[in-house]
Image (cartoon, grey):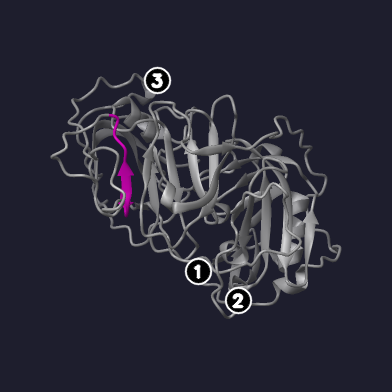
Amino acid sequence: MTNFSTVAVPGTQGVWFTDNLNVGNLSAVNLTMGLAHDLVDPWGVLGIMDWVSEAAQCMLQQLVNQGAAITQAYSLSLGGPDAATGSILFGAIDTEKYEGDLMSLDLGTTLTSVHANSSSGVDDLTVGLPATVSIYVGRQELLLPAELAFNMWAIAGAEYWSEKDTATVPCSMKDSEGSFTFGLGGPAGPKVVVPMRNLVSTLSGFGDTCAFLVKNQTDPEHYHLGVPLLQSVYAVFDMSNAKLAVATPKLDSTTSNIVPFAGKAAHIPSTVSVPDQPRTVVTQTPTIYEMPTATKSFSAAAGFQSSTSDVLPPPPSASTNPAGQSDDPPEAGLTKGATIGIGVGVGVGGFVLGVLAVAFFLSRKRPKEQDLASDKFTNTSSPLPYDFQAPVLEAPVLQEYPAEMDAQPGAYELPPGEFPVEAKTLRPLRYPANAGFHPTSTRM
């Protein structure tokens, strides 16, 4: 057992150790994990992205190496900000959880347009665009070119609060009728509608003041789109081929039709590739670093201050209409329940993994008489294409890491005075702003 630090959460200190992992029907042995003691940021990290700069392989890669998962890919359905649960499928997609085309983009995609929509008008926000952006599974905010972020602040009526180092809005803005539409991958790419409800987050202990989850960034390598956008789409991440696919989520679906990837490094099933994606985007460092004292007027701003008291249907979150923005602004409805599949909580002296709904797709078939997957993920009308039972794995030879971070077998005892805690609230995963995406390494 040796000390470790992690790129995923800078400043976190702890130890590397190995242990068996049992989640649902999945059994994997001798997985290398990190146990955090000193936490700068109280977030756990589940290794489902490909962090090439880490000393140990990510969890998903280790599962593939052991034959417990088909390929380094997963599909994700988060639902809206008030969703109680969610779903994640490793090595498969669920065609009943989305509608329309599943549109395939480069993982390091290009943000080519942003529109502000409300009953008072539509604004085309072009400053800082196009820009290459990362899609982060665990970041709670959108990190955008500074001037673009400032324009969005002005439209939403946000004010910068230096004490919290964030833009803030009244919490009543959760019910705003306004929304922002993000165009990805060029004119033919998906248009993702993000309602204000996804962008307003409670600040504990600050009454009616909430955080506005749009942040300004001056380094083009660190632009990213996080959970507020992912709550509006059904998303598939293919780390092996550096691809991302999105579609309009079907939030009221109660059925499943699970389609596994064909094999290791296979492409995402049932996708339509977005044509003419920008391949090279030269984004200059912004020249504006602070919000101007006087901003231009925006036609959509007045409508953002209007609220809706009725629950409206979800917006057309991932439009596949290549014509782009409609003449009529999309409805900014309140998103309804779906799921968070994996949550990670970190307590004093330990790491707590909470799994609400996880399906691991195995790379070997099982005898027909064995049980299929839990009915959390399937139903009688759409059974899995093959049995859903984890293989019995023998302990593999551990991969060699740098000497100062060698994985060590054996049990680990918590230091005196420390104890594991129960995770009371499961939150999305989080990744740092300073870990930019590099297409050659598929790091996020």
Query: Marks 2 and 1, how far apart in space?
Result: 15 Å
The residue under the point 37% across, 61% down is 425
The residue under the point 77% across, 73% down is 302
Type of amino acid under label 2: Ser
Query: Marks 1 and 3, how far apart in space?
Result: 41 Å
Circle number at residue 402: 3
Q: Main secondary structure of the magenta part?
A: strand
Secondary structure, mark 1, is loop
Reading the chain from its start, which is encountered first: label 1 or label 3?
A: 1
Secondary structure, mark 3, is loop
Q: Which residue is mark 1?
A: 204
Circle number at residue 274: none
Q: How many C-alpha atoms fall within 10 Å of the one at disc 1: few (<14), some, or many (≥20)?
A: few
The residue under the point 67% across, 35% down is 275
Q: Nearer the viewer, residue 442 or 119?
A: 119
**Place of residue 7 in the rendered image (x, y in percent of width and height, measured from the top left):** 49, 36
| Residue 350 can be seen in this image | no
Do the residues bearing badges 1 and 3 touch, measured as CB atoms within 8 Å?
no
Of all residues shown, which one is farthest toward the left? 369
Q: In the figure, 278 relative to 208: above or below?
A: above
Q: Which residue is mark 2?
A: 172
Reading the chain from its start, which is encountered first: label 2 or label 3?
A: 2
The magenta-colored residue range is: 350-363
Residue 4 inside the magenta-drawn segment: no
